[in-house]
Image: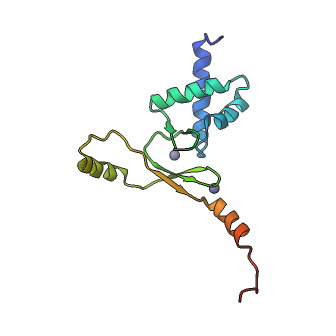
Amino acid sequence: MVDGKPQRNTRQRTVVLEELKKVSCHPTAAELYEFARARMPKISLGTVYRNLELLAQNGVIQKLQISGAEDRFDGNPERHYHVRCVRCGRVDDVHGVPGDLVRADFRTLSGYDIIGHRLEFDGICPACKGTLTNAGHPPREGRRA
Ligand SMILES: [Zn+2]
Ligand SMILES: [Zn+2]
Protein backbone atom coordinates (compact mmCIF):
# COMPACT_ATOMS: atom_id res chain seq x y z
CA MET A 1 0.00 0.00 0.00
CA VAL A 2 1.50 3.26 -1.09
CA ASP A 3 -1.56 5.45 -0.81
CA GLY A 4 -0.20 8.02 1.54
CA LYS A 5 -0.55 11.21 -0.43
CA PRO A 6 -3.84 13.04 -0.05
CA GLN A 7 -3.01 15.29 -3.00
CA ARG A 8 -2.68 12.40 -5.37
CA ASN A 9 -5.94 10.92 -4.10
CA THR A 10 -7.74 14.19 -4.73
CA ARG A 11 -6.36 14.35 -8.24
CA GLN A 12 -7.47 10.78 -8.96
CA ARG A 13 -10.95 11.56 -7.70
CA THR A 14 -11.07 14.66 -9.90
CA VAL A 15 -10.09 12.64 -12.97
CA VAL A 16 -12.69 9.95 -12.20
CA LEU A 17 -15.39 12.59 -11.74
CA GLU A 18 -14.42 14.57 -14.84
CA GLU A 19 -14.36 11.49 -17.03
CA LEU A 20 -17.77 10.40 -15.73
CA LYS A 21 -19.29 13.82 -16.33
CA LYS A 22 -17.97 13.83 -19.89
CA VAL A 23 -19.97 10.83 -21.00
CA SER A 24 -23.67 10.10 -21.09
CA CYS A 25 -23.38 6.34 -21.49
CA HIS A 26 -23.63 5.47 -17.77
CA PRO A 27 -20.41 3.45 -17.72
CA THR A 28 -19.54 0.59 -15.39
CA ALA A 29 -16.52 1.03 -13.13
CA ALA A 30 -14.45 -1.06 -15.53
CA GLU A 31 -15.42 1.13 -18.48
CA LEU A 32 -14.67 4.28 -16.54
CA TYR A 33 -11.33 2.81 -15.55
CA GLU A 34 -10.44 2.63 -19.25
CA PHE A 35 -11.35 6.31 -19.73
CA ALA A 36 -9.45 7.39 -16.61
CA ARG A 37 -6.40 5.35 -17.54
CA ALA A 38 -6.03 7.27 -20.78
CA ARG A 39 -5.35 10.36 -18.67
CA MET A 40 -3.74 8.73 -15.68
CA PRO A 41 -1.96 5.56 -16.72
CA LYS A 42 -1.07 4.59 -13.17
CA ILE A 43 -4.59 4.68 -11.76
CA SER A 44 -5.89 1.26 -10.65
CA LEU A 45 -9.32 -0.28 -11.05
CA GLY A 46 -9.57 -0.47 -7.26
CA THR A 47 -8.96 3.26 -6.99
CA VAL A 48 -11.63 3.97 -9.59
CA TYR A 49 -14.11 1.77 -7.68
CA ARG A 50 -13.29 3.42 -4.35
CA ASN A 51 -13.67 6.92 -5.71
CA LEU A 52 -16.92 6.09 -7.47
CA GLU A 53 -18.38 4.64 -4.27
CA LEU A 54 -17.26 7.69 -2.32
CA LEU A 55 -18.64 10.16 -4.85
CA ALA A 56 -21.94 8.27 -4.93
CA GLN A 57 -22.16 8.24 -1.13
CA ASN A 58 -21.64 11.99 -1.10
CA GLY A 59 -24.38 12.50 -3.68
CA VAL A 60 -22.00 13.95 -6.27
CA ILE A 61 -22.84 11.19 -8.73
CA GLN A 62 -25.38 8.37 -8.86
CA LYS A 63 -24.82 4.66 -8.67
CA LEU A 64 -27.36 2.84 -10.77
CA GLN A 65 -28.15 -0.53 -9.34
CA ILE A 66 -30.00 -2.35 -12.05
CA SER A 67 -31.21 -5.82 -11.26
CA GLY A 68 -29.27 -8.51 -13.02
CA ALA A 69 -26.66 -6.12 -14.37
CA GLU A 70 -23.36 -4.63 -13.26
CA ASP A 71 -23.59 -1.34 -11.35
CA ARG A 72 -23.34 1.70 -13.57
CA PHE A 73 -22.47 5.25 -12.71
CA ASP A 74 -24.09 8.52 -13.69
CA GLY A 75 -22.37 11.90 -13.50
CA ASN A 76 -25.76 13.60 -13.20
CA PRO A 77 -26.80 13.50 -9.53
CA GLU A 78 -30.33 14.78 -10.19
CA ARG A 79 -33.14 12.29 -10.07
CA HIS A 80 -34.14 11.02 -13.44
CA TYR A 81 -35.25 7.73 -14.91
CA HIS A 82 -33.32 5.26 -16.95
CA VAL A 83 -34.19 2.78 -19.60
CA ARG A 84 -31.98 -0.20 -20.27
CA CYS A 85 -31.68 -2.04 -23.53
CA VAL A 86 -32.16 -5.76 -22.94
CA ARG A 87 -30.06 -6.61 -25.98
CA CYS A 88 -26.90 -4.52 -25.69
CA GLY A 89 -27.19 -3.34 -22.07
CA ARG A 90 -26.90 0.35 -22.84
CA VAL A 91 -28.63 2.70 -20.42
CA ASP A 92 -30.22 5.97 -21.47
CA ASP A 93 -31.77 8.86 -19.57
CA VAL A 94 -35.47 9.54 -19.72
CA HIS A 95 -36.41 13.01 -18.63
CA GLY A 96 -39.81 14.50 -17.95
CA VAL A 97 -41.24 11.63 -15.89
CA PRO A 98 -43.19 13.08 -12.96
CA GLY A 99 -41.33 11.18 -10.27
CA ASP A 100 -42.52 13.32 -7.36
CA LEU A 101 -46.12 12.52 -8.19
CA VAL A 102 -45.39 8.81 -8.05
CA ARG A 103 -43.74 9.30 -4.70
CA ALA A 104 -46.56 11.34 -3.16
CA ASP A 105 -49.19 8.85 -4.31
CA PHE A 106 -47.21 5.91 -3.07
CA ARG A 107 -46.85 7.44 0.34
CA THR A 108 -50.60 7.77 0.63
CA LEU A 109 -51.18 4.22 -0.57
CA SER A 110 -48.55 2.53 1.56
CA GLY A 111 -48.59 4.59 4.76
CA TYR A 112 -44.77 4.53 4.66
CA ASP A 113 -42.54 7.57 4.64
CA ILE A 114 -40.88 7.11 1.28
CA ILE A 115 -37.23 8.09 1.16
CA GLY A 116 -36.55 6.96 -2.38
CA HIS A 117 -37.66 4.75 -5.16
CA ARG A 118 -36.34 2.96 -8.17
CA LEU A 119 -38.21 2.28 -11.31
CA GLU A 120 -36.72 0.23 -14.08
CA PHE A 121 -37.63 0.35 -17.69
CA ASP A 122 -36.41 -2.36 -20.02
CA GLY A 123 -36.55 -1.99 -23.75
CA ILE A 124 -34.77 -2.34 -27.04
CA CYS A 125 -32.71 0.68 -28.05
CA PRO A 126 -33.00 2.30 -31.49
CA ALA A 127 -29.67 0.84 -32.62
CA CYS A 128 -30.68 -2.69 -31.67
CA LYS A 129 -34.13 -2.23 -33.17
CA GLY A 130 -32.37 -1.57 -36.46
CA THR A 131 -30.35 -4.80 -36.35
CA LEU A 132 -33.42 -6.75 -35.25
CA THR A 133 -35.39 -5.56 -38.23
CA ASN A 134 -32.57 -6.30 -40.64
CA ALA A 135 -31.75 -9.74 -39.24
CA GLY A 136 -35.28 -10.90 -38.63
CA HIS A 137 -37.03 -9.58 -41.68
CA PRO A 138 -34.60 -8.95 -44.53
CA PRO A 139 -36.21 -6.38 -46.80
CA ARG A 140 -37.09 -7.95 -50.12
CA GLU A 141 -38.42 -5.61 -52.68
CA GLY A 142 -41.18 -6.74 -54.96
CA ARG A 143 -41.50 -10.13 -53.31
CA ARG A 144 -44.61 -9.47 -51.31
CA ALA A 145 -47.59 -11.67 -52.16
ZN1 LIG B 1 -29.41 -1.93 -27.61
ZN1 LIG C 1 -28.70 9.09 -16.17
Residue 68 found in image quarter: top right
Residue 4 found in image quarter: top right
**What colour scheme governs how the chains and residues are painted in the rendered image of this protein?**
rainbow
Find the residue positioned furthest to the bottom: 145
Find the residue positioned furthest to the front: 68
Number of numbered discs on residues: 0
- Going by the image, does 128 lie left or right of 68? right
Residue 38 in the image: above or below residue 131? above
Relative image position of residue 115 (x, y in whole percent): 33, 38
- Going by the image, does 27 lie left or right of 65? right
Residue 32 in the image: above or below residue 121? above
Relative image position of residue 145 (x, y in whole percent): 71, 89
Residue lying at 53% horizontally and 55% vertically, measured from the top left: 122
Q: In which quarter of the image is ligand 1?
A: bottom right
Relative image position of residue 61 (x, y in whole percent): 50, 35
Q: Quadrant of the N terminus?
A: top right
Residue placed most toward the observer, 137 or 6:
137
Residue lying at 59% horizontally and 54% vertically, measured from the top left: 86
Residue placed most toward the observer, 13 or 132:
132
Residue 78 in the image: above or below residue 83? above
Residue 73 found in image quarter: top right
Relative image position of residue 81 (x, y in whole percent): 46, 50
Residue 22 in the image: above or below residue 84? above
Residue lying at 76% horizontally and 86% vertically, measured from the top left: 143
